[in-house]
Image (cartoon, rainbow, N blue to C red):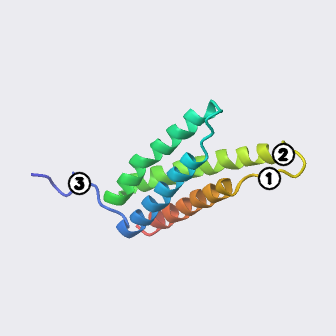
Amino acid sequence: MTTAAAVPARVRPGLGRLAAGLTAASAVVHLLLLDASSLGALATAGMALACLPCARHLWRSPTAAVWGLTAALDAAMLGLHAHMLASTSAHAHSGASVGGLMWLGLGLIGGQLLVAGAAVLRR
């Protein structure tokens, strides 16, 4: 028999499902950005796979701890990707631009962070 104290309280399950969808979409974007000629492709694939356990927890049981971890990871990813974007832009040759998938990924990460923030603030 489990007590109420042993079972973590779910926080905003509707927002959890929205965040899970954004997380899964982010994983798909990582997979679409794979470059077989780059050693970084392995890291990119690993990052895509790392998103899936979070998506599962957000879909099934979005506890306060899951939301906190989601917000922290989203903020770290946003910072890392912004740095990568700045480095890419600084080294672009003759007007070459960063692809739309990179911008889509940044938008998804930003959206995930906003949803996580809303869930944490509304608990």
**Callout 3: few (<14), some (14-19), or many (20+) C-alpha neighbours within 10 Å?**
few
Q: The residue under label 3 is which amino acid type?
A: Val
On the picture, is 117 further left or further right than 39?
Answer: left
Label 1 and label 3: CA atoms lie apart by 49 Å
The x, y position of residue 69, in whole percent, is: 46, 49
Q: The residue under label 1 is which amino acid type?
A: Ser
Q: For the point 59% across and 42% down, which residue is it?
A: 34
* Residue for badge 3: 7
| Residues tagged 1 and 2 counted as in contact (Cβ below 8 A) | yes
Q: Nearer the viewer, residue 3 or 112?
A: 112
The x, y position of residue 109, in whole percent, is: 58, 56
* Residue for badge 1: 97
* Residue for badge 2: 92
On the picture, is 20 further left or further right than 86?
Answer: left
The x, y position of residue 89, in whole percent, is: 81, 48
As helix, strand or loop, the secondary structure at mark 3 comes to: loop
Q: Nearer the viewer, residue 6 or 42?
A: 42
On the picture, is 114 further left or further right than 99?
Answer: left
